[in-house]
Each structure stands twice: as C-alpha cells, then as structure tokens.
Image: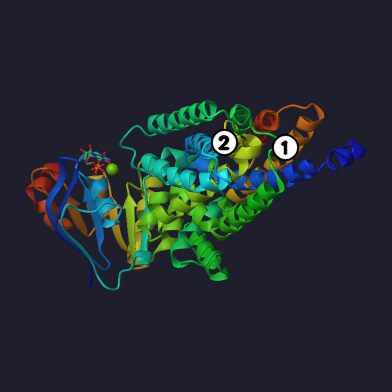
C-alpha cells in the first residue's frame, strides 16, 4: 500500500495534481458551505459552464494563457448571476440555467469548429495530466489568496449567510461581502476546472458542504468538517483514478457520493441519540 | 426626550402599486411604538424603510445625529432557510456584534462578554452550546432577541416577535420586551397583529390603513374612531 503510494507519487504529474487538487478542494469546500446555505448552489454550476465557454473561446483564438483570460469573464459572470438571484424578479434559477447552457453551447461550437476536439474532452471532464508546472504555481497562488480572504472575512461570511437582512439593517455592508463570496467562488472554479473538468467542478463545492451539514450542527465544525472531508475525498479519488485509470473528476465525485451516503446514515444515528 | 427618528410624508410602492402614502410620525427616546394594521397594509414595508433596506419614493426619514446604524437592533421575521441553519446559539448571538467590528476580522474578548451578558439576560444559558436548528420556535426567538441586543442598545425593531408562540411564551416575550423598554431604556418599535396587547404595553400606536392611518399615543388611539372599532366603548 505505502509502496504503491510512493510509486504513484514518483510521477511529477501526480505531485502537481496533488498540490493543485488539495488546494482547490479546500477552497471549494469552505465557500460551498456558504453557497449551499444561501441557496446559491446553482451559481457555482452556472459559473463552471461559463468558465468552459471562456476557456474554449480563449484556446480557439490561440491565446497564450487561456486560464488567465477565463478569470475576468467568470468573475463578471459571477457578479451578474448574483444580481439575478438577489433581486429575484425574473425567475432566477431559469435565468441561470439559460446562461449556463448558452455558454456551454458556444464553447462546444467554437471548440469543434476550430478543431480543438481533444481539448474539449479535458475541459469538460478534466484530466489528471492537464496541469503543467505553470498551472500549479498559478493555482497555488490563487488558492492561498482565496484561503486568506476566507479566514479574514469568516465572521462576515457567517453573518451574511445566516441573515443578510439583519446584517444590512444593523450596518454591515452585506452587498460587499456577497460580492466577495461571488468573487472567491469564481476564482475557485477557474482554478479547479482544468483538473476536475467544468461539468464536475461544482460538485467540489456542493458535496462536502452537504455532507458536513448532515453530521455537524455548529457553523465552525461544519466548515472544518467540510474542508477535511473534501481533501480526504479528493485524495482517495485521485489515487483510485490513477490505479484504475479512471477519469479523475468523476472518481472524486463518486468518492464524495459514497461519503454522502455514509453521512446520511451517521446523521440519522446522531439525530436519534439526541 | 429627544427625537430619534422623524418621518415626513413618506410614500412607499412596489412597481406601480402604492403601499404607503403620505405618512408622518416621530419616534422619540424611550418610546414603545406598536405598528399595527391588517395584512398587506405595509407594516413590513415600513419596517424595511426605517431599517434602510428599502428607500422611500417620497418624503424623508431623518435620523437624529446621535442614532447610528450600530445603535440599532433588529429582530426579523424568521425565514424558512434559517430554521435549519447549522450554527450554535453562541455563534448566532455573537454575530450581532459584527457591526461594531468594522474591518477587524475577529471578535474581541469584550464582544464575547457582551454576547454572554445578553444570553444571561434572556435566560438561555442552557441553550448556549445547542444547535440553533434544534430549538423550538420560542427558543429561537429568544436567541434572535439576544443577537439583536448585541447589535444595538438604543433602538430595537421587532417584526412580529410573538407570531407562532404559545400564549405562555407570548406573555413572557411581552414581559421581556417591556422590561427592556422600562429598565434598560431601550426604544422599542414593534410590528404586531395583536392590537389588544399592543394597547396594553405600547406608549404610541401607528395603525396603517389604506384610507387613513393613525399615529398618536395609546390613549388617543383608544379614543379614536379606529380604536373604537377594536375596543368598543371603553
Ligand atoms: N417584494 C414585493 N413586490 C411587490 N409587492 C410587494 C412586495 N412585498 C410586499 N408587496 C405588497 O405590498 C403590500 C404591503 O406588504 P407588506 O409585506 O408590507 O404588508 P404587511 O403589513 O407586512 O402584511 P403582513 O401583516 O401580512 O405581514 C402588499 O399588498 C404586498 O402585496
Ligand atoms: Mg409583514
């Protein structure tokens, strides 16, 4: 077992995947708690599709750094989707679905017309060998930035997640902190997209949060559990994807699925005891 | 007694529907104001206006110079999403201190002390470590009131604080609010459906009505045509 792991991580690409993936899993799981509780899960999903569209277009026009180009597009989309969900006048979820499918359609069309067919697959479903050293450095810097921001704004994020109106009424600039949550989510999605694939990246945001809410009842423990579960599931998913040459993103989601089933059972048990 | 908030000829509307027209009243230090009126008369809309969550179409809301946003506490109507929120009682109460933190990221010892004091004041010490989502409606209401007290000590807005509570807990809640008003000298603005209790505790009444709203002291209200309708000949 140990020997297998040592052999596995003697590959440079596995080390890169491990570093990048762990950081992305951490960021996604922390933000996920707030997004799920605010009923913003669909925003994460929508953003990942917008990210795919942006990546595909950027690669098609031969941009040197497609990931970096995708960032501003996804950030702008995040603010936009946030506005749609906030004012609630148009059917928010329908609008998000419209935007995300449109972005997906544009991305696929542009990519296949310009002959990027091999890349499409890895953008959509992720790839363990997708990250080069430059990507890892870029991802690490962004992830560390996201983590610092999250810790710094932790109490504010709690307040606007629990009760936005109260926060606003008593003089907290809830709008600003919503924007910060949206910004960090957008960054996380761009950072994770290459490995997880845009179809599956939102699962990194949603699964760990839902899992930890099943078993924990304090916000701080929910956050800590969510982060631990996320990193653990990522590690198991990554290694099994290597062992069985299964797609990385999908393996990680399946591990999360199993974790959720376990959490549901534990949750029932904990409830009964109380 | 100084004036805290003065409202002049306020009007609120949604899209093209006017909800409140030409409403003037004042809230002074130490008042216990009850806002009553039938469903859809605009009580929640007015509360949102006073809290700065919705801006008026016409008229002015003038805050006195010594009333800052961070002097205001607020007990909102609970949203369904909150009812099963995974947070401990202490985390919820402490979050009321956020408005005095500014950009500083973490709570101080003093903030935690204040949270403990308010938890003690509302008699919910045993609940402190419990999860908010496992509490009964009345317990949750007390937790939110403790949070409101952490946020502001001058003016407290309460939006239907007794809805869904049983008669005994309702009575306790009213006593608690009366005590905050009398002993701690906190100005109270309460939205309520319960006109009889409102008249018993409040010093002033604002009755919203699509034809003619009423604002005045409780005694004036009881003698007014609107009051007579509810109280008969007194
Ligand atoms: N977001 C909104 N968009 C459009 N109209 C609204 C909105 N919120 C409230 N209204 C309308 O404004 C009017 C006043 O609503 P409001 O919620 O202020 O009444 P209320 O006095 O609080 O009623 P209740 O006693 O039922 O709580 C109602 O006719 C309502 O339909
Ligand atoms: Mg209302």
Look at mark 2 in the image and give the residue it sits on: A202
- Residue B109 found in image quarter: bottom right
The residues tagged by marks 1 and 2 sit, at their Cα atoms, a distance apart of 20 Å
- Residue B52 found in image quarter: bottom left
Viewer can see residue B166: no
Q: Secondary structure at mark 1?
A: loop
Q: Where is residue A102? Give x, y as percent.
A: 43, 29
Q: Secondary structure at mark 2?
A: helix
The reply to whether dot 1 and dot 2 touch (C-beta < 8 Å) is no
B220 or B187: which is nearer to us? B187
Instruction: Tell which circle, 1 or 2, labels the residue nearer the N-terminal end.
Output: 1
Look at mark 1 in the image and give the residue it sits on: A129
Q: Left or right of B4: which side holds A84? A: right
Measured along the vertical axis of the image, is residue B182 above or below residue B128?
below
B4 or A51: which is nearer to us? A51
Q: Where is residue A227? Give x, y as percent.
A: 66, 46
């Amino acid at each position: 077992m140990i020997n297998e792991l040592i052999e596995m991580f003697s590959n440079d690409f596995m080390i890169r995947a491990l570093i990048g993936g762990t950081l992305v899993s951490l960021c996604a799981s922390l933000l996920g708690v707030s997004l799920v509780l605010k009923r913003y899960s669909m925003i994460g999903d929508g953003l990942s599709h917008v990210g795919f569209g942006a990546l595909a277009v950027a690669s098609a026009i031969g941009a040197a750094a497609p990931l970096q180009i995708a960032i501003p597009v996804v950030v702008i989309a995040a603010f936009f989707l946030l506005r749609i969900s906030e004012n609630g006048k148009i059917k928010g979820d329908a609008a998000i679905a419209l935007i995300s499918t449109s972005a997906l359609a544009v991305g696929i069309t542009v990519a296949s017309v310009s002959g990027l067919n091999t890349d499409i697959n890895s953008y959509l479903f992720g790839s363990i060998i997708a990250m080069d050293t430059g990507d890892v450095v870029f991802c690490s810097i962004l992830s560390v930035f996201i983590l610092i921001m999250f810790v710094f704004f932790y109490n504010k994020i709690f307040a606007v997640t629990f009760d936005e109106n109260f926060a606003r009424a008593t003089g907290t600039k809830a709008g600003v902190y919503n924007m910060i949550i949206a910004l960090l989510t957008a960054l996380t999605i761009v950072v994770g997209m290459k490995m997880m694939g845009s179809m599956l990246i939102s699962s990194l945001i949603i699964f760990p949060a839902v899992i930890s809410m099943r078993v924990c009842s304090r916000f701080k423990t929910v956050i800590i559990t969510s982060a631990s579960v996320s990193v653990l599931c990522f590690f198991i998913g990554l290694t099994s994807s290597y062992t069985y040459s299964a797609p990385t993103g999908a393996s990680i989601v399946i591990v999360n699925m199993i974790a959720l089933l376990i959490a549901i059972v534990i949750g029932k048990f904990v409830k009964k005891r109380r | 007694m100084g004036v805290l908030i003065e409202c002049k000829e306020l009007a609120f509307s949604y899209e093209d529907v006017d909800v409140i027209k030409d409403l003037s009243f004042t809230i002074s230090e130490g008042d216990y104001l009850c806002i009553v009126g039938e469903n859809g008369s605009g009580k929640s809309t007015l509360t949102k206006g006073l809290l700065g969550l919705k801006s008026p179409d016409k008229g002015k809301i003038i805050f006195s110079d010594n009333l800052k946003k961070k002097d205001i506490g607020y007990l909102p109507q609970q949203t369904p999403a909150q009812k099963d929120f995974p947070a401990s009682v202490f985390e919820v109460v402490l979050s009321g201190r956020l408005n005095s933190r500014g950009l500083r990221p973490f709570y101080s010892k003093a903030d935690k002390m204040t949270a403990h004091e308010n938890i003690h004041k509302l008699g919910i010490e045993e609940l402190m470590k419990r999860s908010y989502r496992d509490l009964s409606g009345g317990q949750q209401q007390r937790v939110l009131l403790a949070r409101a007290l952490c946020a502001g000590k001058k003016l407290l807005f309460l939006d239907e604080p007794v809805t869904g509570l049983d008669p005994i807990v309702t009575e306790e809640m009213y006593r608690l609010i009366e005590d905050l008003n009398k002993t701690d000298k906190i100005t109270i603005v309460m939205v309520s459906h319960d006109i009889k209790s409102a008249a018993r505790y409040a010093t002033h009444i604002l009755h919203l009505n699509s034809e003619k709203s009423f604002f005045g002291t409780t005694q004036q209200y009881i003698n007014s045509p609107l009051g007579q309708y509810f109280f008969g000949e007194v």
